[in-house]
Image (cartoon, rainbow, N blue to C red):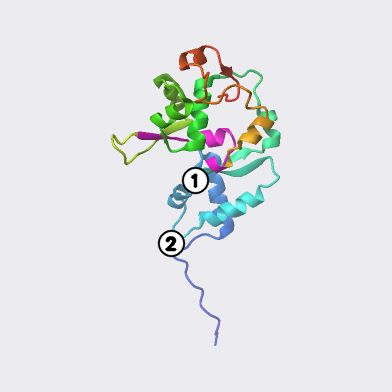
Amino acid sequence: MNDAPEPIEKTLFEAPVMAEQERMVEAVLFASATPVTLAELVARLPHGCDPAEALVTLRRRYEGRGVQLVRVGDAWAFRTAPDLGHLMQKEQEETRKLSRAAIETLAIVAYHQPVTRAEIEEIRGVAVSRGTVDQLMELDWIRLGRRRMTPGRPVTFVVTEHFLDHFGLESARDLPGLKELRAAGLLDSRPLPGSLGSPSEEEESQSGQSELFED
């Protein structure tokens, strides 16, 4: 008499083993042109999979490799290791320089988000032109946020995941502090926004060019 237990039939909804889940997550991330959120991974993988655990394992597995799994806001993507970035540079690059007005506006949004146009103007001490905001939105570095529950319900501005990805940040909390910016030579002795002697936006757009931010 054979007392061996009968094999349990697998259901169609049984999740693959973790190694296979890692392979699926890896494939989706490599094939995607943009960072992929956890919710998108859950929707793509078979029912019962745990992409969050697969991401943790993959991130650890790719440590020290030529490409790394990084978090970009609420999404994930494979990116070239920072110390190998110079190998990816093109021989000819077309840079898009931002005016001082655009740089200050971008910095205010990044450090004070969500922030309204009126608040940006209050901090800078000068009016913000539509062209400055349009340029930053065309670069996909800032976007519209939620409306404030105040009279007029003004819209707010926040930085995008593309901005975080461009500068290698997981979130806006990883932005460098004032001392770090000055130590790196990214801040000079010019008057801060809102201080006396701050030039008009028209003057800035014609003169104060900077290479801090390049597309």
N-terminal label among 1 and 2: 2
Is residue 100 depicted above or below 143 in this figure?
Answer: above
Q: Nearer the viewer, mark 1 or mark 2?
A: 1
Label placed on residue 13: 2
Q: Which residues are magenta?
A: 155-173
Question: Is 96 or 132 nearer to us in this picture?
Answer: 132
| The quarter of the displayed image where residue 157 is located | top left
Is residue 27 depicted above or below 193 in this figure?
Answer: below
In this rendering, does residue 81 appear at all? yes
The residue sitting at 54% across, 49% down in the picture is 25
Amino acid bearing label 2: Phe
In the current view of this chain or complex, which residue is farthest to the left?
152
Please name the residue that numbered disc 1 is placed on.
74
Percent x, y of residue 175: 58, 38
Q: How crowded is the residue under tag 2: few (<14 C-alpha within 10 Å), some, or many (20+)?
A: few
Amino acid bearing label 1: Asp
Percent x, y of residue 100: 53, 20
The secondary structure type at the circle numbered 2 is loop
